[in-house]
Amino acid sequence: MRIDIVTLLPMLFDKVFEESVLGSAVKNGLVEIVLHNFREYGDGRHRTVDDTAFGGGPGMVIKPAPLVNCLRDVRRLAAPGPVIGLTPQGLPLNQKLVKELALFDRLILVCGRYEGFDERILSEFDLELSIGDYVLTGGEIAAMTVVDAVSRMIPGTVGRQESVEQDSFYKGLLDHPQYTRPATWEGLEVPVVLQEGNHAGIEEFRHCRSLLTTAVSRPDVFAAAELSDQDREALQSLLS
């Protein structure tokens, strides 16, 4: 997959895509990340990309011409792919959407700054995404989040596919609780079933705990999950 990132601050991405699992994916050619500074398309000697808002108000607004001209050039650099604006009004990023984005061969992510984009830029976006209901200084951290989440879905990025499939939200539920050695620590015991080596029992225990954790910690996620009759019976037995 090729991911183009359009930003005013490409230096913020230094080292981010060179370490850990994502760094290995880049080195192995599974993911290609290309940065584009749209200030190069700015107006005049100072490469201006922003201006004051019509009607007044604090802060500056990204002008349409520099960013749109940059996007049009970036689109032509490789095979088609959706242009995704990282905006507060965008669709909330979730695992279902992450898996859908991972099906594309190319993504183009656009990072905002200041008070946001001139409204006339938005028609250039095929999709708008938000990573949460809070304020960030710019779209760069959001872009890093999208790249990291999507890259994990590309086969080969994570060494074992089952590690990906057991992540929280992959199947619509939170992950089950995890334990490691020692079996007893400060009087707290690892559940016996996890120590017995019965794989069917372990699988059942983990699934039940995943259901319970989701129901208690994220009832909104649990409400949207597709549950079987067996799931409901298992959860009822835990709560009774």
Image (cartoon, grey):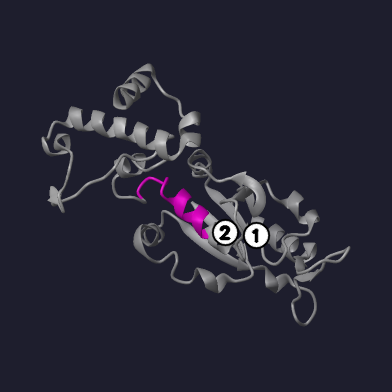
Q: Is residue 33 left or right of residue 193?
A: right
Number of marks in picture = 2
Query: Could you tell me the amino acid type at mark 2?
Result: Asp
Is 77 one of the magenta-colored residues? Answer: no
Query: What is the quadrant of residue 19 in the picture?
Result: bottom left
Disc number for residue 203:
none
Q: Which residue is mark 2?
A: 4
Disc number for residue 74:
1
Residue 76 in the image, given as x and y percentages of width and height: 66, 56
Residue 196 in the image, given as x and y percentages of width and height: 10, 35
- Which segment is the magenta one? 144-156
Q: Residue furthest right?
A: 55
Is residue 149 in view?
Answer: yes
Residue positioned 62% across, 44% down in the render: 91
Is 155 one of the magenta-colored residues? Answer: yes
Disc 2 to disc 1: CB gap under 8 Å: yes
Image quarter where the C terminus lies is: top left
Query: What is the quadrant of residue 29 in the picture?
Result: bottom left
**In the depicted structure, whether residue 31 falls above or below residue 222:** below
